[in-house]
Amino acid sequence: MTKKVIPWNKGLKGVQKHSEETKKRMSETRKGKGYGVSGKPPWNKGLKTGPRSEETKRKMSETLLSKRGHDISEWKRYRGRCSYLTELVYAEYNHMINPNNYRRTKSGVYGGYQIDHIQSVKECFDLGLSPEHCCRVENLQMLPWKENRLKG
């Protein structure tokens, strides 16, 4: 005995369209409940949205500066520059950095290796060293991804 499968549209052909009256009724019942019809997305639940004022940005920057000892955007720029330079140096000197031709992978791939900075990028940033100094050939090595992650 075969089981009869009822399709999702129950055999109706084409796309069902709501009448204007039905659309209006649905719109009225949803207003003010955080649906898209009311203009308020459900995920912000009426919180203030929009661009931050310059004063708010300044206060946030000062808070981050006092907590971390540096401006977060400065660290992001440094890290991004190091990432870019690391790839350039690896492309040019991969025969020195990766003489055994290990396969480069992301974390979690069995048998995969990653480029590692012997003196970490964060340490170089804290010491005030340039990104160019941090990404020298002498500071790069290949490590299995697990060891690289354990280093922090």
Image (cartoon, helix red, strand yellow):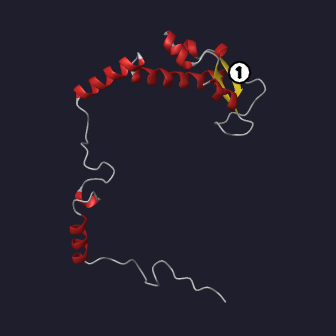
Q: Position of residue 44 (x, y in %)?
A: 30, 48
Type of amino acid at the residue the image marks with label 1:
Ile
Which residue appears farthest toward the bottom when viewing the image?
A: 1
Q: Position of residue 101 (x, y in %)?
A: 76, 29
Q: Name the one closer to the observer, 44 or 144.
A: 44
Q: Residue at x 67, y 36 (%)?
A: 105
Q: Viewed as shown, does residue 149 lie left or right of 34?
A: right
Q: Name the one closer to the observer, 86 or 113.
A: 113
Dividing the picture into quarters, in which one does residue 50 lie? top left
Q: Residue at x 45, y 79 (%)?
A: 9
Q: Is residue 42 above or below residue 50?
A: below
Dividing the picture into quarters, in which one does residue 147 lie? top right
Q: Position of residue 64 (x, y in %)?
A: 36, 22
Which residue appears farthest toward the right when viewing the image?
A: 100
**Secondary structure at numbered mark 1:** helix
Quadrant in the picture for the N terminus: bottom right
Q: Residue at x 36, y 18 (%)?
A: 65
Which residue is labeled 1 in the image?
A: 97
Q: Viewed as shown, does residue 111 lie left or right of 124?
A: right
Density class for disc 1 (Cα within 10 Å; few <14, some 14-19, many ≥20) is many
Q: Viewed as shown, does residue 80 lie left or right of 92?
A: left
Q: Is residue 51 above or below residue 65?
A: below
Q: Position of residue 78 (x, y in %)?
A: 47, 20
Q: Residue at x 30, y 53 (%)?
A: 41
Quadrant in the picture for the C terminus: top right
